[in-house]
Image (spheres, grey):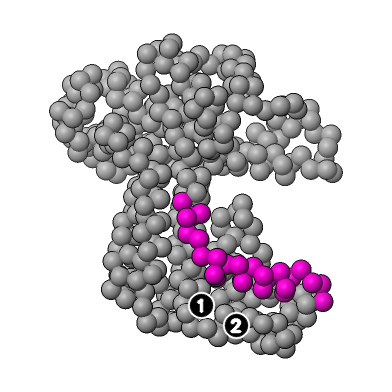
Amino acid sequence: MKGTTTGKEFYNELKSMLENLSIPLDKIVSISIDGAPAMASMNVGIAQTLFNDIRKLTGKEIFVNHCIIHQQNRCVKILNMPNVTTPVIKLINFLKSRALNHRQFKEFLKDLGSEYGDVIYNTEVRLLSRGAMLKRIYNLKNDIQLFVEMKEYPFPQFEDKESMCDFAFLVDITQYLNNLNMELQGKSQFIHNMFDKINAFESKLKIWNKHLLSNNTSHFAHLRKETPSETRKYAQHLQKLLTEFESRFKIFRSEKTVLTLNIFSSPFNIEVETVPDELQMELIDLQNDTDLRNKFQNVDIHNFYQNYMNLEKFPRLSTHAKQIMTLFESIYVCEQLFSAMKIIKSDHRSRLNVRLESCVRVAVSSFVNKEII
């Protein structure tokens, strides 16, 4: 799209693409968005417009999901400690933005035999960079302190106990958030797997909150090194983070969504009376099939529904499972495709327009090596 890109124009392009691919609206089971106004607006957003059109056509309400990874990134924004990040970013700019300082600093670290050879920039749009940047500065704090004293650059935070406690806490919690983000990435995940990880992280936040309220730093390695006298203020940051997680992922806690996911992820444990009437008879047959119960416990869930669920015997449960497996829990695969396309179509390969689609398809496809007999 080379002109304007309003929500209405996006939707027209989407409808044209669906028509070209012969995909009818009644086959769409969900919409996953990234939260941009053109996507999420209640008035002109693609998601709402498509949702309304499908409801008019089929009478059913499809599932609209805001990308789980994007939501987690938005939650991280609530963790704001400018008293730590602002001085650290200024310090990094002092060390890296001036060519002479940067050369001298890297040589200084080399002479000291430091674990790292340089510091790294913080990129606001890349969530993982802040955690890596903070941890690198914290681990190099003694070497950096020697260098800035030699350069007569004032950085009193390294000598202030309260500032270092704040710094250490931020290093610990951003590392936990980075680990969660990495767990949420990848192709071979279903929506219930990702929400399980969100639930697990919320439970951890509750435990960490209780521990910090009682001055227990057992789960915060860097903070424990600084031996803080009082940790209640850090519990307040965790409570804000927990509230943000609970607010942004409340759609997954609705009774309808929980039931829908449980039918897919735990068909042998769910109460038959709680599921929709059209699934009850098939679910009773499934729960009383010992062979299928054993298979469900011993194979991955995708393999079970694809290879062991009899489509003729369980048509409605099979259809339900297919709908859950086609839900886009995040826009990870879309972002991965755009990244691959950007790498392929560089300035030095500008004549790839004709074969770009083929190159991208090869780049994002999974291949399995099979022995040729």
Callout 1 secondary element: helix
2 or 1: tag closer to the N-terminus = 2
Asked if residue 370 is among those painted magenta in the image, a careful observer would answer no
* CA–CA distance in space, label 2 to label 1: 9 Å
Q: Which mark is residue 328?
A: none
Is residue 301 shown to the viewer in this render? no
Most common SS among magenta residues: helix
Q: Is 347 on the left or on the right of 162, as rendered?
A: right
- How many numbered dots are placed on residues in this image? 2
Q: Residue 20, percent across and down?
A: 62, 15
Q: Which residue is pictured at 63% across the width and 62% down the height?
A: 122
Q: Which residue is pictured at 64% across the width and 68% down the height?
A: 89
Q: Amino acid at mark 2?
A: Pro
Q: Residue 252, percent across and down?
A: 35, 39
Q: Which mark is residue 156?
A: 2
Which of these two is toward me, 284 or 271? 271
Q: Which residues are magenta?
A: 75-100
Quarter occupied by residue 135: bottom right
Q: Amino acid at mark 1?
A: Ser
Callout 2 secondary element: helix
Q: Would you name the residue on which mark 1 appears?
A: 163
Asked if residue 81 is among those painted magenta in the image, a careful observer would answer yes
